[in-house]
């Protein structure tokens, strides 16, 4: 919670700064630069307090953040109290120990967010409710998390999604309805380096325009009847190493 004095200073900054970066915490774990398409806010090894103060300072300028980048920050849970109503085009949170994402945490950036990279975290389940309102999201990266099962409608509401990468998880099962509600735009899917014992043909059948499928480094011993047709519909299929 920010102190009244800090809030007062931030309100004064809102009036003083138009386009451009406002002053950020003195620790310098966060940096801001002005790009052609908006602000670029990058925080590396920042404390949660510095992170919150930096985000609040940016939010008060009411400017669009082109890139919001967190690296090596111990977040645990990602929640609305941290991100607020910050408008963001591209959000990256790498190696931030994220175990959960609250349902309303991304609401502030829902209509602006185009890409989301949550690689190298600790998610055990796709946070479907938090993702559902991201109607303009084109790219989602969940590489190197702890996902084991893709549940039904895991990506519900992501109607603009073009690219989905789930490389390096522990996925062993994909529900038949896992991709229900994704929309008809998904062209690239990376399921490489997981624990799949067979090609998830039934879920993949629903991806009508899928062009590139990556299934390498799984535990697929051989193709079963019906899987050839699904795979042959893809224009690009990365080599699978049968065991």
Image: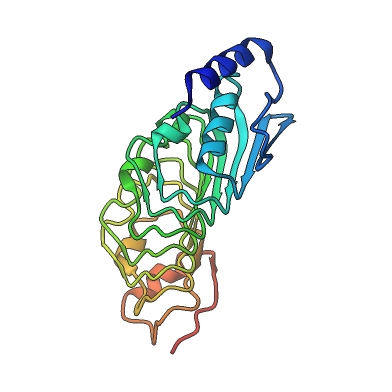
Where residue 102 sits, quadrant-wise, is top left
Q: Quadrant of the C terminus?
A: bottom left
Q: Quadrant of the N terminus?
A: top left
- Check the image and report above or below for 242 versus 136: below
Q: Position of residue 134 (x, y in %)?
A: 42, 37
Where residue 27 sits, quadrant-wise, is top right
123 to the left or right of 142: left
**Residue at 59%, 45% in the rendered image:** 46
Which of these two is toward me, 219 or 2?
2
Q: Position of residue 172 (x, y in %)?
A: 33, 73
**Residue at 35%, 54% in the rendered image:** 126
Where residue 131 sits, quadrant-wise, is top left
**Residue at 39%, 39% in the rendered image:** 79
Visible in this render: residue 163?
no
* Applied colour scheme: rainbow
Visible in this render: residue 105?
yes
Q: Position of residue 59 (x, y in %)?
A: 55, 24
Which of these two is toward me, 6 or 114?
6
- Check the image and report above or below for 225 versus 235: below
Which of these two is toward me, 151 or 233?
151
- Check the image and report above or below for 91 versus 230: above
Q: How many marks?
A: 0
Q: Position of residue 119 (x, y in %)?
A: 51, 57
Residue extending furthest toward the top: 15
């Amino acid at each position: 919670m920010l102190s009244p004095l800090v809030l007062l200073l931030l309100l004064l900054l809102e009036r003083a700064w138009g386009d451009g970066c406002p002053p950020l915490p003195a620790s310098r774990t966060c940096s801001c630069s002005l790009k052609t398409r908006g602000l670029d806010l990058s925080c590396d090894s920042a404390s949660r307090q510095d992170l919150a103060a930096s985000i609040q300072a940016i939010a008060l300028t009411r400017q669009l953040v082109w890139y919001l980048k967190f690296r090596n920050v111990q977040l645990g849970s990602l929640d609305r109290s941290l991100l607020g109503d910050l408008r963001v085009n591209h959000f990256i949170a790498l190696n931030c120990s994220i175990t959960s994402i609250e349902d309303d945490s991304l609401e502030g950036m829902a209509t602006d967010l185009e890409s989301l990279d949550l690689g190298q975290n600790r998610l055990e389940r796709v946070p479907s409710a938090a993702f559902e309102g991201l109607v303009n999201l084109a790219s989602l990266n969940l590489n190197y998390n702890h996902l084991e099962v893709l549940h039904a409608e895991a990506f519900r509401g992501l109607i603009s999604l073009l690219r989905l990468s789930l490389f390096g998880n522990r996925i062993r099962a994909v529900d038949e309805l896992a991709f229900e509600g994704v929309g008809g735009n998904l062209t690239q899917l990376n399921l490489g380096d997981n624990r799949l014992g067979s090609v998830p043909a039934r879920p993949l059948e629903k991806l009508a325009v899928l062009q590139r499928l990556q299934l390498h480094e799984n535990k697929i011993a051989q193709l079963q009847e019906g899987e050839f047709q699904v795979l042959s519909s893809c224009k690009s299929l990365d080599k699978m190493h049968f065991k």
